[in-house]
Image: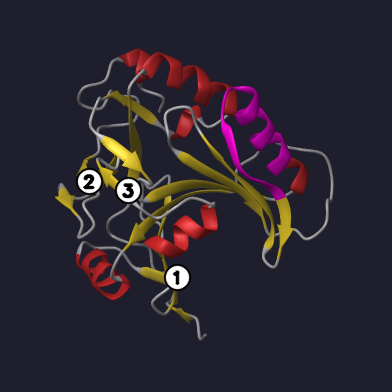
Amino acid sequence: MVMATTSSIASTTSVASVTLEVADPDAAHRFYTAFGVDSYLRLRASEAHTTGFRGFSLALTVSRQATVDSFLGAAEDAGATVLKPAAKSLWGYGGVVQAPDGTIWKAATSAKKDTGPATREIDDFVLLLGVEDMKASKQFYVGQGLTVARSFGSKYTEFAPGEGGIVKLALYKRRGLAKELGVPADGTGSHRIVLGSTAAPFTDPDGFAWEAAAPLGTPAAGTSEASTLT
């Protein structure tokens, strides 16, 4: 498959914040602090109905295999369920866990060999959205001001980060993403995630909601300072 790329032009729209909707913000706060990703997230209390695969995952890209093990081990110790134990693959080394609130996380590195001790440094914080129609979703996001950085036809699209963005956004075919994560693709109800945008609020073709991002350190709507992790 041919990979299409663009020049290194930043998007005019970016993911400025990620808010997870959870049943127990205090418990989620403790988990994400122990996991080591608390500075990347906001939390919002919600009892919205959701079952099965929520259609997205969050991923940590790191430089060393030991760092992958460190993050996955911390998540498991804090109460996460292992969906895929860390293992070598064609692309490197990684594993998948599910947080107690239901959010699925992947930690991975492209390093084929273990090159040193864990650093706990995150190179990229990636949001993978599972979509039904890659062409339509890609065109929609380009229309919202995002710039395609890499594209593998109908299977994967990655967007360039915009100014103020803390998260790298990528699209994956929903069933392909579920297979990659080791879960069934079926799911209903709320995605339980809201994305802060540097542009106006919108909802994408797969129902993922974007809202105007609050300034850094300001609680998202429906949160308290205690549950605001940015």
Q: Which residue is mark 1?
A: 8
Amino acid type, label 2: Trp
* Residue position for label 3: 187
- The residue closer to the viewer here, 22 or 35, is 22
Circle 1 or circle 3, nearest the eye = 3
Of callouts 1 and 3, the N-terminal one: 1
Q: Secondary structure at mark 1?
A: loop
Q: Residue at x 25, y 64 (%)?
A: 141
Query: Is residue 221 in view from this perspective?
Result: yes
Q: Mark 1 or mark 2: which comes first in sequence?
A: 1
Amino acid type for the residue under numbered disc 3: Gly
Report the Cα–Cα distance between label 1 and label 2: 24 Å
The residue segment tinted magenta is 68-86
Q: Which mark is residue 210?
A: 2
Disc 2 on helix, strand or loop? Answer: strand
Location of residue 14 in the rendering, given as x and y in whole percent from the top left corner:
32, 52
Q: Name the spot of residue 148 as percent of width and height, x first.
A: 37, 70
At horizontal 38% and vertical 77% (from top left) the residue drawn is 154
Give 151 or 85, whichever is nearer the viewer.
Answer: 85
Q: Residue at x 71, y 35 (%)?
A: 70
Asked whether, in this view, residue 28 is left or right of residue 90, the answer is left
Query: Which of the image's four quarters has the C terminus?
Result: top left
Return the residue nearer the eye: 100 or 111: 100
Q: Upstream in the sequence, badge 2 or badge 3?
A: 3
Res. 77 image quadrant: top right
Q: Amino acid at mark 1?
A: Ser
